[in-house]
Amino acid sequence: MLYLVHAGTVISTASELEPAYPGRWQRGQILYFSINSEPLDDNIEEAALMNSSGELWHVEILTSSHPRNRDSPALSGVVARVLRKLEADAALLSLLPQRPKISAFPLTREYAA
């Protein structure tokens, strides 16, 4: 599971990844993923996608809007560009216990409201 992290805060889990395998992502590659939060503010230009194993992808946020798939239970979709792959340090890994209480997407949008 990947977590979207910005400014020292876990914003959401990331799901519906395209391309699906983070281990194959390359620098400069364009990604799509959905999140269980409102669209990201325009002032969020960079963020990190991180897993609990300590792998971290520094990404440039290109746009955030409604999910690509209108039937998705996600609240928003994000398009981003991979800037580089890093290893998360202990301070970043310590953020994961604060991750959102809902670890999976709700079944309906009404449930999330």
Image (spheres, rainbow, N blue to C red):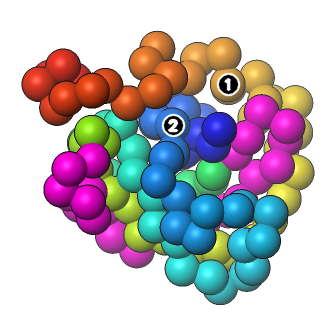
Q: Magenta part of the protein: which range?
A: 50-72
Q: Is residue 71 above or below residue 13?
A: below
Determine which quarter of the picture holds residue 59: bottom right
Q: Quadrant of the C terminus?
A: top left
Q: Position of residue 25 (x, y in %)?
A: 72, 73
Q: Are marks 1 and 2 in contact (CB under 8 Å)?
A: no
Query: Can residue 56 be seen in this snapshot?
Result: yes
Q: Position of residue 94 (x, y in %)?
A: 76, 23
**Looking at the image, is mark 1 or mark 2 earlier in the sequence?**
2
The residue positioned farthest toward the bottom in the image shown: 28
Q: Residue at x 35, y 37 (%)?
A: 36
Residue 57: say if magenta. yes
Relative depth, front residue between 84 and 112: 112
Q: Residue at x 47, y 53 (%)?
A: 16
- Separation of marks 1 and 2 at Cα, in angstroms: 10 Å
Residue 96: mark in rendering: 1
Residue 13: mark in rendering: 2
Q: Secondary structure under badge 1?
A: helix
